[in-house]
Image (cartoon, rainbow, N blue to C red):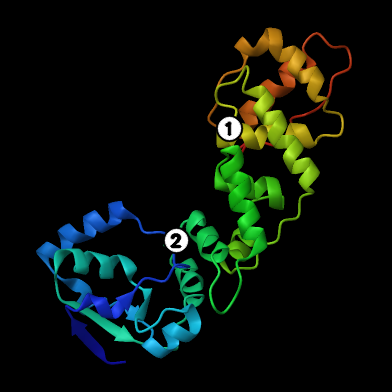
Amino acid sequence: MKTYFTTNFTDFSLIPANRPIDWGKIERMREELKRKNLTKLYPPVVNSKAATKRRDGITDKMGVVDGQHRYISCKLEGLKMYYKISDEAELDDIPKAASMQNSWKLTDYIHHYSTPTNRRPAKTDYLLLGSYASRNNFPISTSLTILCGDRSHYVTKKLKAGELKITRDWNISNAFADAVDDLGKYITFNKQARFLEAFLIAFLNKEYNHDKFMVKLDYLSSKIRRCSDSFAHLEQIEYLYNFNTNKKVKLNTIERTGR
């Protein structure tokens, strides 16, 4: 594949469905480019103008498929940019390749598959996952556990490949979010990832009664402290739930790692 170079950046265009720009990364990259322009060794990959128009609806531009941060950095610095043209490379190929390098964050994959292109519409499950996390101010990883059952390697692999499916009933997911909001009256860290994971286990227990737990929190909330892991949080939740109660309910159903 031939390598070209240019300082005419008007020939190129970013692709909306690519991952969001990390401006902190741009600043770091600009400093490195001032020291040494490595785009000759690591050239951005672009589609031809014809392929960019066909795939992304962008007229008379070469779409930057891979290397958008290098492209922006060279443009801002006014430096020569080396690049390669390949119509074999499609934007949907990039997150799959990136998954082997662990270079994209979960939020990058969600943004990518939530953005429509000429070749595919926005993927509903990704829109819903992003919306749920944003609306409830939950971490993405925890939202994945809530909506898909866990955040195992299998689930995250599906997410990165564009094959994510939400499996949790929405009534349960929304009821859980409402219950977490209730806890905010007494617990300042109610939306911290480890606490959310612990509370989800308790909330899904068939014997858990949310009104009962809220009554206990009303006079025992001072006994709950932020912990470093879900196991310890669940121990506290179970202790408060069963405080001064004859019939004890087993809410802590996980095992501490290393025990």
In this orientation, does residue 152 appear?
Answer: no
Mark with earlier residue (2, 1): 2
> Which residue was labeled with disc 1?
191
Looking at the picture, how far across and down is residue 3, in whole percent? 24, 88
Instruction: Tell me which residue sits at (73%, 36%) in the image.
Output: 176
Q: Indicate the quadrant containing the N terminus: top left, top right, bottom left or bottom right.
A: bottom left
Dot 2 alpha-carbon crowd within 10 angstroms: few under 14, some 14 to 19, many 20 or more:
some
Q: How many marks?
A: 2
- Compared with 99, 242 (above or below) is above
- Compared with 145, 89 (above or below) is below
Residue 225 is left or right of residue 73, and the answer is right
Instruction: Tell me which residue sits at (73%, 40%) in the image.
Output: 174
Instruction: Tell me which residue sits at (35%, 55%) in the image.
Output: 22
Is label 2 in a helix, a strand or a loop?
loop
> Which residue was labeled with disc 2?
104
Instruction: Tell me which residue sits at (30%, 65%) in the image.
Output: 69
Name which quarter of the figure residue 116 lies in.
bottom right
In this orientation, does residue 91 appear?
Answer: yes
